[in-house]
Amino acid sequence: MSRDIGIPGIVPPKVKIEECNDQSCPYHGNTRIRGKITKGIIVSKKSRNTVIIKRDYVQFVKKYQRYERRNTRLACHLPNCLSHDVEIGDLVRVGESRKISKTKAFIVIEKISQGAE
C-alpha cells in the first residue's frame, strides 16, 4: 500500500509493495517531501538510484538591465518504483527532502512527459 505524500495532483505509482523496498521512497518508505518542488530534464542516469536533472532559469543582470540564461544540475534520488519509467531526456518533478547523501536532497516524485528521444 502506498501513502499519499500530501502534494495535490500527484498520484502514487501503481506497483506492488514488494517491488519497492526503498526506505527513501516517499510513497513506500518513510521519507517526507517538504520544501521546494521543482521540475527538470534528466541528463544522466548512470548511478544506482540517482539521476542528474538540469534546470534552466533566467537571471536578471542589473548593470545591463537584461536577463541571461543559466542552468543548474541537481542530483536526485530515484525510487525503485519509478526507476523503470524514467529515461534520459524525460521531464520529471522533484521534491525536496532531508539529505539522503552528500549531494542528494531531492527525490523524483513523478514523470511529467516523455523525452524527445
Image (cartoon, grey):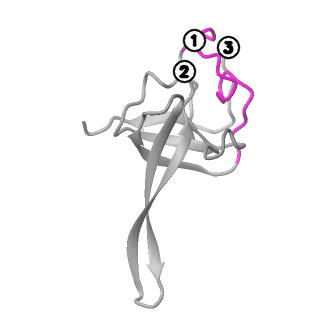
Say which of 86 and 4 sits in front: 86
Query: Is the C-beta separation of discs 2 and 1 under 8 Å?
Result: yes
Which comes before the other along the chain, label 3 or label 2?
3
Q: Using the image, determine if residue 86 lies above or below residue 59.
A: above
| SS for dot 1 | loop
Q: Using the image, determine if residue 60 lies above or below residue 86.
A: below
Question: In the picture, which quadrant includes the C terminus?
Answer: top left
Q: Residues within 10 Å of mark 1 (few under 14, many from 20)?
A: few
Residue at image location 67% in from the left, 21% down from the top: 28
| SS for dot 3 | loop
Residue at image location 42% in from the left, 88% down from the top: 65
Magenta residues, dominant SS class: loop
Q: Position of residue 113 (x, y in %)?
A: 38, 37
On the picture, is 54 further left or further right than 9?
left
Q: Which mark is residue 81?
A: 2
Choose mark 1 or mark 3, whichever is in front. Answer: 1
Q: Which residue is mark 3?
A: 1
Q: Position of residue 6 (x, y in %)?
A: 69, 36
Q: Position of residue 45 (x, y in %)?
A: 42, 34
Q: Quadrant of residue 97?
A: top right
